[in-house]
Image: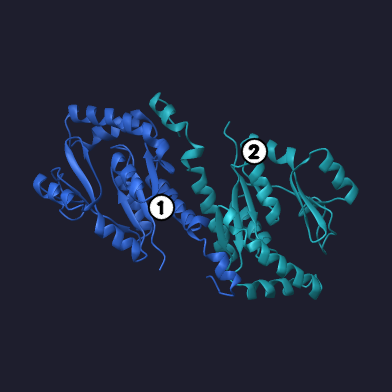
Chain colours: A cyan, B blue
Amino acid sequence: MKNGLLIVVSGPSGAGKGVTCKRLKELAPDIQVSVSCTTRDPRPGEVDGEAYFFLTEEAFNEKIEQDGFLEHAVYLNHQYGTPKDYVLGMLESGRDVLLEIEVQGALMVNAHYPEAILMFVLPPSLEVLEQRLKKRGTETDEQTRKRLEMAKKEIELLKSYDYVIKNDEIDKAARQMLAIIDAERCAVKRNLDLSKRLLQGENIL
Amino acid sequence: MKNGLLIVVSGPSGAGKGVTCKRLKELAPDIQVSVSCTTRDPRPGEVDGEAYFFLTEEAFNEKIEQDGFLEHAVYLNHQYGTPKDYVLGMLESGRDVLLEIEVQGALMVNAHYPEAILMFVLPPSLEVLEQRLKKRGTETDEQTRKRLEMAKKEIELLKSYDYVIKNDEIDKAARQMLAIIDAERCAVKRNLDLSKRLLQGENIL
């Protein structure tokens, strides 16, 4: 059984990671979305086990000690982490797994799992990013300002990623992600067995 | 102006390079198809300047001496070559260029132009490949046998390519090529300017 693809979507807060991944999941329902753990408070309407597993600081730290995360990071005073066994198990069973995580965390995943496909979602401009953060309306001006400063630092890390998605229209951005996944399935580095199998007389379809 | 993409499609004779590229061109009419030069005789219905420019041995060798080819190779006693100025000029003007060429030639393009995207078209099985070559009906049994032997040697070169296309259905194969082109347009290595432009306050769309 060939391993599934580990698709990591990241980018600054307000770039539109969440909505784009949601649309991608509609377009490609076979992709398994990994649910992260966090110590931040749920936003209005967020249900435990859907967008996130909401853990206490104590429970989160215990999971770190047990080496239970593929990556974990602190972001604006809260911890975020990707449950390791869950993701690796899915990949080994041949399923493609989508992680929507923070920029630091994505680079940590890549260090542990270099076959991961790293996508960075960018807003059309910093102005649009600021508007989106303000529109969200769940944060104070001070929180928005901090997120914007953080975004600028994160954008400098684009060069460590594989692909960039300019997120102007959600549907278009999701379809670009889908094209990248299709292309990566065709990458020779993931299909080195094909020439041997073909030459042995096998049907490779 | 950003350079266009150089898309190189290759694979053994009978894998279906030609029909797949034709369909790709229908799906993406903006892609410029490069016309190669060859010293082989036209097949019934082939017009000079469409599938190929048909040159005499003398004219072909003169063009080699003038360094007029991006790649050229001998394949089953005939010469094939890609006119250099034409292709580089198109790329510099921002157009994507499609080359449908023999396996040796594709590797030579990659050596001269490493940004090229190399796609290898495979048949579902050697059996299907043989059937397709026989069905073509333009060649003797001896020619078919030679092409099949050549194909086996070529298939071993898959590992030097970027992407593999399993060609079972023409339309599906062409759409995979299109996904690869879309994905390559999003590759960070081709968009390293974006983070700087964004941080300078530019709109990057």
Q: Estimate the x, y position of residue B187 in percent, counting from the top left.
A: 50, 55
Q: Quadrant of the N terminus of chain A?
A: top right
Q: Estimate the x, y position of residue A24 in percent, counting from the top left.
A: 61, 55
Instruction: Say what secondary structure mark 1 lies in.
Output: loop
Q: Residues within 10 Å of mark 1 (few under 14, many from 20)?
A: some
Residue named by callout 1: B115
Q: Residue furthest top?
A: A200
Quadrant of res B120: top left
Subunit under mark 2: A
Residue named by callout 2: A91
Image: A132 above or below A119: below
- Badge 1 amino acid: Glu
Tell if the residue under mark 2 belongs to the same chain as the one under mark 1. no
Picture residue at 16% right of the left edge, 36% below the top: B77
Image: B50 above or below B198: above
Image: B69 above or below A91: below
Choose between B166 and A157: the one closer to the eye.
A157
Choose between A124 and A29: the one closer to the eye.
A124
